[in-house]
């Protein structure tokens, strides 16, 4: 697999020095513990109107969020905010977020350490993001009129992790919520994965490969590949093997046949290196080989694990099997021993 | 193997009219209009009224129904219509169909046609990846190639070419000599897309790889245009405007274990057995041999298969085409002038039909790059697929 070159065009001055590996890891670690500075206050105090919208949207019918009497009946001093609404109180809103982004891009506003860290990872090629988990701890209920502030800090940055989505770093941000008196009311840990998207073409996830048309004569082949087995037809009458599939035996015309497993090993009889046109599902230049299996049958498949210049007629190869989508697996050849 | 045979229509039928549109990269017209223009031009060339046409033949790959041509041109009643499958392999077979219909009395005037916007519309070279995977044999044949990235005609032919080079010692330069000859001939043919644009072997070697071992200049053009051919009895042709191009032989051929461009399962990938089937019939029926031919119009969608054809037709021994194409043998004035119109690499890609028209001009003596003292010309259709061929001759 060819490794993707890391982008080092430095919008972020720190990133331009990043070559990856340990340098990057050290730089990432230096963000641990950095905070956004002074707590920033929410735009509005905890209020009934926003609570009403929230429980309406969530379908939460607990009366303690809307009904003063019901709240008192539960031993509370008054209506409380739904705990899960914690983050809603400090959200700055869509337009304000856009404005902040614009201002940072224009250099009118310094980014937070989180912004800086995200930019650094973008530059290093970890361009995709997915939220993985969020934990909240509530120290006391929030009442109408509570005016919250929040202070965020970077709790941890993981080392490079291999995940199903691709290689990346987990970032955990801690947010401390305080009330008007500066006392803690809640904390939140929010974890994301910043990752380098897997390059699909040479991975097992080449979802855009042309799908094979399958008939009753050929379905067995694809049932075999799904189980990691190379199946061919064997004449039920004379035993002759054949591929590609056909309904009858060219030797004896028998319509009876069995699917038998053959070794996926063989030699390259001929090959091509495709350069044009280029289809998104494949990596180019693409080596496609015509292989003569040890049983004598021939089969075409693409090759992995070899540079085009190193492919030669006569080369010993062996097929593995890879899913191209949810249902179809295909053989793919590699030089034996690689 | 069949016994020697001579086709009864041979020597009694002729090509008596040819007509084409311009060959371009963007016709700006419907494929049907291109077909209609070409058919009308061929009838004018022959001097035959539209009302006399009673047969039409085309490719199953053609999108222009016979009845639409007939309706547009007021052809009236048709008694014969037939289509040939397998892409460019159909070209010469359309003439064979017409000749058989005429000789058997089924029709008197049959027009063969092919028209498409192959450059500005549906490009064959773009690949089969967009074809729906239908559960039938025609679609399923691609299942053994397309999912692995072997998507285009160039890629299917390249698999043969690599093996051929490996076993015969043929080089990319040897393939290049075919392109150079075609382009030199096109450079003096005003109807050719590459008129005035010859190339050198260095140009060929410097052109980028499309599918190794094939380079850009090993691949034919993509063309918009139409070409039509009129077939009548030889007797009728003698009363028409131009000297008849006598059909001395016409043949179709499919080989053992034939596949569509991917006959990779035969013992040796250095042969085109389907063209051997055609060649055998051509020589048997015409009564002549390779030494009696003064010009060859060989299907040249990709240069390697021109070398294969020289061997299959008997112009040289197996594996020796690389020697045959050296030293100008396939250029005008050489041992066997190849594609004097420029072929599909130089003039245009009309699925082989423009090559038949060139053979007619050579027999008439009216070609722009005329071969002197020509008596016979051999023409072939698409290679790597079930194919066809013709021997045309002068009327003496
Ligand atoms: Zn059998």
Image: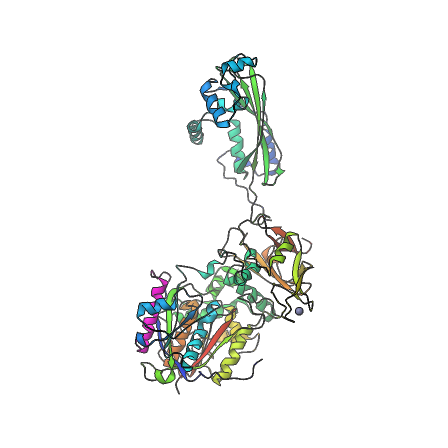
Total residue callouts: 0
Rendered residue at 65%/71% (across/down): A252
Q: Nearer the viewer, residue A280 or A64?
A: A64
Left or right of A86? Residue A100 is: left
Q: Quadrant of residue A168?
A: top right
Left or right of B244? Residue A300 is: right
Rendered residue at 57%/74% (across/down): B319
Is A109 one of the magenta-colored residues? Answer: no
Residue A163 can be seen, yes or no: yes
Left or right of B366? Residue A158 is: right
Rendered residue at 69%/64% (across/down): A295
Q: Nearer the viewer, residue B241 or A125?
A: B241
Q: Nearer the viewer, residue B337 or B1?
A: B1
Q: Does A282 appear above or below B113?
A: above
| Magenta: main secondary structure | helix
Q: Which residues are magenta?
A: B24-49
Is B35 one of the magenta-colored residues? Answer: yes
Residue B313 screen position, x and y as percent: 52, 78
Residue B63 screen position, x and y as percent: 40, 64
Residue A90 screen position, x and y as percent: 49, 22
Residue B195 can be seen, yes or no: no
């Amino acid at each position: 697999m060819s490794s993707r070159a890391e982008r080092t065009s430095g919008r972020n001055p720190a990133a331009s020095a990043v070559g990856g590996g340990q340098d990057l890891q050290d730089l990432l670690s230096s963000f641990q513990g950095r905070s956004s500075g002074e707590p920033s206050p929410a735009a509005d105090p905890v209020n009934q109107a926003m609570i009403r919208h929230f429980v309406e949207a969530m379908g939460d019918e607990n009366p303690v969020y809307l009904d003063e009497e019901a709240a008192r009946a539960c031993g509370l001093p008054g209506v409380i905010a739904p705990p899960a609404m914690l983050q809603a109180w400090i959200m700055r809103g869509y337009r304000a977020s856009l404005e902040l982004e614009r201002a940072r891009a224009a250099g009118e506003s310094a980014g937070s350490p989180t912004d800086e860290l995200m930019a650094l990872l973008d530059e290093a090629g970890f361009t995709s993001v997915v939220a993985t988990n969020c934990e909240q701890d509530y120290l006391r209920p929030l009442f109408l009129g509570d005016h919250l502030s929040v202070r965020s800090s970077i709790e941890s940055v993981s080392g490079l992790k291999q995940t199903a989505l691709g290689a990346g770093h987990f970032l955990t941000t801690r947010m401390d919520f305080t009330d008007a008196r500066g006392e803690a009311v809640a904390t939140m840990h929010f974890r994301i994965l910043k990752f380098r998207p897997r390059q699909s073409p040479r991975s097992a996830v080449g979802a855009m490969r042309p799908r094979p048309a399958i008939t009753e004569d050929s379905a067995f082949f694809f049932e075999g590949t799904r189980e990691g087995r190379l199946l061919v037809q064997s004449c039920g009458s004379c035993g002759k093997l054949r591929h590609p599939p056909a309904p009858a035996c060219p030797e004896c015309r028998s319509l009876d046949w069995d699917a038998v497993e053959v070794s996926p090993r063989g030699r390259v009889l001929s090959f091509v290196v495709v350069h044009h046109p280029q289809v998104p599902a494949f990596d180019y230049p693409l080596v496609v080989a015509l292989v003569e299996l040890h049983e004598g049958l021939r089969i075409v498949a693409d090759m992995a694990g070899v540079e085009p210049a190193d492919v030669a007629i006569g080369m010993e190869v062996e097929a593995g099997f890879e899913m191209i989508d949810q249902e179809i697996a295909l053989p793919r050849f590699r030089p034996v021993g690689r | 193997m069949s016994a020697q045979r001579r086709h009864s229509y041979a020597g009694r039928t002729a090509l008596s009219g040819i007509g084409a549109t311009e060959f371009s990269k963007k016709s700006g017209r419907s494929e049907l209009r291109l077909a209609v223009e070409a058919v009308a031009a061929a009838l004018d060339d022959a001097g035959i009224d539209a009302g006399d046409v009673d047969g039409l033949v085309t490719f199953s790959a053609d999108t222009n129904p016979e009845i639409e041509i007939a309706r547009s041109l007021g052809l009236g009643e048709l008694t014969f219509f037939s289509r040939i499958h397998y892409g460019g392999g159909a070209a010469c077979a359309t003439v064979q169909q017409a000749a058989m219909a005429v000789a058997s009395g089924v029709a008197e005037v049959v027009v063969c046609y092919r028209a498409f916007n192959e450059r500005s519309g549906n490009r064959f070279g773009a690949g089969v990846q967009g074809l729906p995977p239908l559960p039938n044999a025609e679609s399923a044949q691609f299942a053994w190639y397309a999912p692995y990235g072997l998507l285009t005609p160039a890629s299917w032919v390249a698999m043969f070419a690599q093996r051929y080079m490996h076993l015969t010692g043929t080089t990319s330069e040897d393939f290049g000599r075919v392109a150079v000859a075609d382009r030199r001939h096109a450079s003096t043919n005003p109807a050719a897309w590459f008129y005035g644009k010859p190339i050198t072997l260095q140009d060929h070697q410097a052109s980028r790889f499309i599918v190794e071992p094939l380079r850009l200049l090993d691949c034919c053009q993509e063309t918009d245009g139409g070409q039509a051919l009129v077939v009548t009895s030889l007797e009728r042709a003698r009363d028409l405007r131009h000297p008849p191009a006598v059909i001395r032989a016409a043949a179709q051929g499919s080989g053992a274990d034939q596949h569509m461009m991917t006959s990779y399962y035969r013992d040796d990938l250095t042969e085109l057995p389907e063209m051997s089937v055609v060649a055998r019939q051509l020589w048997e029926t015409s009564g002549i041999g390779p030494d009696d031919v003064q010009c060859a119009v060989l299907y040249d969608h990709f240069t390697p298969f021109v070398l294969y054809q020289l061997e299959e037709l008997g112009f040289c021994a197996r594996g020796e085409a690389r020697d045959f194409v050296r030293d100008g043998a396939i250029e005008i004035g050489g041992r066997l002038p190849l594609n004097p119109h420029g072929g599909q690499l130089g003039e245009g890609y009309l699925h082989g039909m423009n090559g038949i028209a060139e053979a007619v001009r050579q027999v008439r003596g009216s070609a722009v790059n005329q071969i002197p003292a020509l008596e016979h010309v051999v023409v072939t259709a698409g290679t790597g697929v079930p194919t066809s061929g013709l021997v045309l001759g002068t009327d003496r």
